[in-house]
Image (cartoon, grey):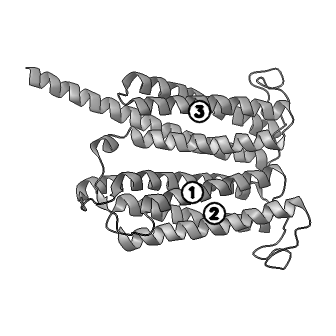
Amino acid sequence: MPRKARGVSSVQEESENIGLHRFALFTACSTAFLIFVGGLVTSTGSGLAVPDWPLSYGMFFPPMVGGIFYEHGHRMVAAFVGLLTVILTLWICIKEERAWVRRLSICAFLAVLAQGLLGGLTVRYLLPTSISMTHACLAQTFFCLTIGIAMFTSPFWKHGFPIIKERHEKLRLPILCTLTTGVVYVQLILGALMRHTDSGLAIPDFPLAFGRIIPAMTSNHIVIHFAHRLGALAVTIMVSWTYLRIRRHYSEHPLLRTPATVMLTLVLIQLTLGALTIWTAKAVLVTTFHVVTGALVLGSSVVLMLRAFNMVRDRKPAVVFPIREAAWQ
């Protein structure tokens, strides 16, 4: 009887873990959608379509017309993500045994709280660049937190990853993945600076810049825009380097190969969207998808980085579990 009771308890615990993991995944996906909606606000210039906060024209639900549709819609989606984060944090604090995961969920809750306050300040202070940029960068950080929580609450994470011997001595794969993630994040900061200083069309042609490889730096807008282009080049180099390393040395491990392939594919899409943003003079949907694709590049790099740190170890023999790895594909 005791064995049966323990078995039932184990099944129930596993079911709860799967439910928590799926809810965390839903929160991460909702956060990606929130970034898309936030991109719509900046792409349509609707940041001050609703001049007050936390209410909208003194109402909870104003007429959804013109720019109000984008700005108030953004607030509604943000409130929904905030609610999901509260539920997720409480769920983890009650059910999760690992203290560091509980602390991470609390960080996510504090981040979404700060994000809401920053959103209000951007309206109250009429879209100051410093606050708007902080709001944009914190959104990317919060997205990474939700991705991490979704990974850490997975039953597969608790069961453990296959351990792989490091196959390159000069620069370890986990470090390379970390550097790649850092470069992507810096590029997103440059992108936020470009959007919030209205420098998106400071250089109106592409792939050249005023018909030259390096333009004359005659204004801060041109400097910011060109820095973003250089950042795109740096991201492309780092992502390609990471992808080629994994294809060359770890191609038999889909846990690494799949996110690396996704990351490279997203970067190619992002480069195309960046060019189209200029060629279409910042068409709303093109610009917005450019914003959210950047977030997805960051997200895929975070997934790859976390897996690399858990799988690729020094001085340990290679161990492959094909069935378990297939489940992650």
- Where's residue 107, x and y in %? 55, 32
- The span from disc 1 to disc 2 (Cα, nearest Å) is 8 Å
Amino acid type at circle 3 is Val
Q: Identify the element where label 3 is drawn.
A: helix
* Residue 65 figure quarter: top right
Which percent across, then down, holds residue 236? Answer: 60, 68
The C terminus lies in quadrant: bottom left
Q: Earlier in the sequence, mark 1 or mark 3?
A: 3
Q: Is residue 302 left or right of residue 138?
A: left
Tell me the quadrant of the picture where the N terminus can be found.
top left
Q: Position of residue 22 (x, y in %)?
A: 41, 37
Q: Nearer the viewer, mark 1 or mark 3?
A: 1
- For image coordinates 76% across by 30% down, the residue present is 120
In the rendered structure, which amino acid carries the disc numbered 2?
Answer: Gln
Residue 227 visible? The answer is: yes
Q: Can you see residue 84?
A: no
Residue 66 is labelled as: none
Residue, disc 2 = 270
Instruction: State which tag comes first along the sequence, 1 or 2.
Output: 2
Q: Earlier in the sequence, mark 2 or mark 3?
A: 3
Q: Nearer the viewer, residue 128 or 75?
A: 128
Compared with 189, 131 (above or below) is above
Look at mark 1 in the image and give the residue it sits on: 297
Residues at marks 1 and 3, CA–CA distance in whole angstroms? 21 Å
Comparing labels 1 and 2, the label whose residue is closer to the camera: 1
Q: Residues within 10 Å of mark 1 (few under 14, many from 20)?
A: many
Asked whether, in this view, residue 5 is left or right of residue 101, the answer is: left
In this orientation, which residue lies closer to the viewer: 275 or 256?
Answer: 256
